[in-house]
Amino acid sequence: MRIFQRLLPGKKDLRKKERKNSKTLAFKRSPNFYGEFNTFPAVSVILIGLSVILLATALLTNENDFTTAVLVVVALANFLTALIISAFTETKGINPLFSSMLYPPLIISRAKFFSELNVFGDACFIPKEVAGSDDTIQFNPTGEYKGFDYKKEMFSTDTKKTAGIFTTPSSESLMLCLKNDYSLSLLHYEEETSDLTEELKEITKEIFCESFPLCEDVTLTQNGDEMIFSLKAFALTDGCRIVRDESPKCCTASPCPICSLIAAATAEYSGKIVSVSAVRPDFKKGDLTVILKVLSHQPTGEGHGSLN
């Protein structure tokens, strides 16, 4: 799990010091996180570097003798060997098509489960500070939801507000992975000193372009109460296609681990309750757009479950 730590009141000096002395994200990759990868490309680079050193030595000595000839021959041999290794070896990795096939049945089944119980609202993500829990909570309402006091029970039947179902987000395993395999620190957003949109863009970009390279770039724009994330050249669009063939509603009622992680990260970092308003994959370009809506009733800072 990714740790989205919100420092307690009265820790402003410590928060500013940590923000000044470190990046928003500080990843530490576990040695065995990706398994053992092919090391031949690294060998190729070493051989090419060695050939350059040998040629430079031969040129600088400027001696037309047997030693210079040997250096040139060895350098050429290293260079050709490096080219052969690079041309005929591949780096191990996970096939994106295979990865995208892992979760669609579970996402579709969960959405059908909500539908059978007449729970038709979009998935909302309640940050742990509001919920008073260890992690972000997903809530699917039966109708319009503006925010209400969190109760630690699976089903909410408070007819004065909104009935619905509390569940664990599908991104929980990704968050646990980030917690266990990375040394990650995410400081809570400060409205008076930070740009929420810019910082969230950097956070999601580091996750999906560097730590888990699933796309080429991430952009984020804000339009009123909506936050629009765009993942360029998203690698798992085949999974999106299967889910949307069942129903586009599945994407907002039961978000996949990727969309769920974006929503959970946004909720935790901003300290606000957000809902997944729309998910729009572009199968021609291979892009993915996730639209989150910041709900009107938000924490007042008076304790867990205090909303305005």
Image: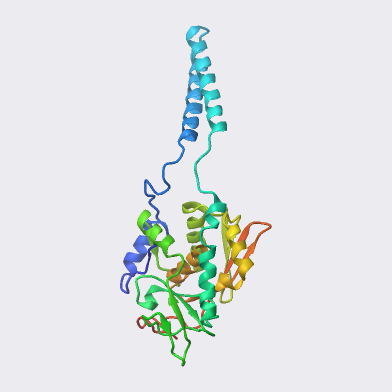
**Residue 227 seen in the figure:** no
Q: Quadrant of the C terminus?
A: bottom left
The residue nearer to you, when weighing 252 against 232, is 252
**Residue 211 seen in the figure:** yes
Figure check: 14 above or below 23: below
Rendering colour mode:
rainbow
Residue 177 picture quarter: bottom left
Figure check: 303 above or below 47: below
Q: In which quarter of the image is the N terminus?
A: bottom left
Image label count:
0
Q: Which residue is drawn at 38% across and 63% down?
A: 3
Picture coordinates of residue 306 (x, y %)? Answer: 39, 84
Figure check: 54 above or below 196: above
Residue extending farthest to the top is 65
Residue extending farthest to the bottom is 160
Figure check: 59 above or below 283: above
Q: Which residue is drawn at 49% across and 7% down?
A: 66
Picture coordinates of residue 235 (x, y %)? Answer: 57, 54
Residue 148 picture quarter: bottom left
Residue extending farthest to the right is 284
Picture coordinates of residue 223 (x, y %)? Answer: 60, 73
- Relative to 89, 173 lies left or right: left
The residue nearer to you, when weighing 146 against 272, is 146
